[in-house]
Image (tube, helix red, strand yellow):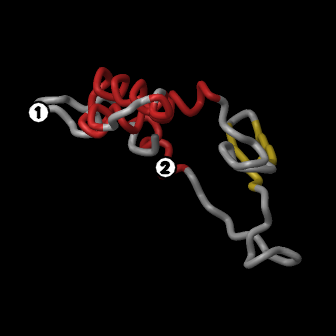
Amino acid sequence: MVMRPEVRAFMPKVKRVPMEGKGSLLGVVGYTDLAIDTKRGRFTIRQEHAPGSPEEPMTAADRVEKFMDCAGRVLGERGAKVLLEQLENLGSVKNVAAGMAATTPKEGVKETA
């Protein structure tokens, strides 16, 4: 996701500010404070847990979206869908050969972004 042009365009505007790690484990405080300065003022929010962490787990739809985004870049959208179906049915297959074959990009597959 960080390679998307719209995200890359914002990166020069982002500034990381170190936080004091008092009372934390190895300087990790367990949350992230975000502040966005705009012409209308400063907007702040505290993100207590990282999305996808055990405290804020991904939904099934989140996992599918992330899988399709990542696998689709290598396998193309159709190839990623085939592999996802193979993986979702992994517990009931007698032979994993089709699933293994689905992990290999087909020649000429264009990346999807």
**Residue at image coords 16%, 32%:** 106
Residue 109 versus residue 49 in the image, above or below: above
The image position of residue 13, as x and y in percent, is: 54, 49
Total marks shown come to: 2
Q: What residue type is labelled 1?
A: Glu
> Would residue 72 appear left or right of 92 to someone viewing this image?
left
The image position of residue 55, as x and y in percent, is: 78, 47
Between the residue at mark 1 and the residue at mark 2, the CA separation in whole angstroms equals 34 Å
Query: In front here: 16 or 42?
Result: 16
- The secondary element bearing badge 1 is classed as loop
Dot 1 or dot 2, earlier in sequence: 2
The image position of residue 73, as x and y in percent, is: 31, 35
Circle nearer the viewer, 1 or 2 = 1
Q: Mark 1 points at which residue?
A: 107
Which label sits on residue 11? Answer: 2
**Residue at image coords 42%, 29%:** 84
Query: In front here: 25 or 75?
Result: 75
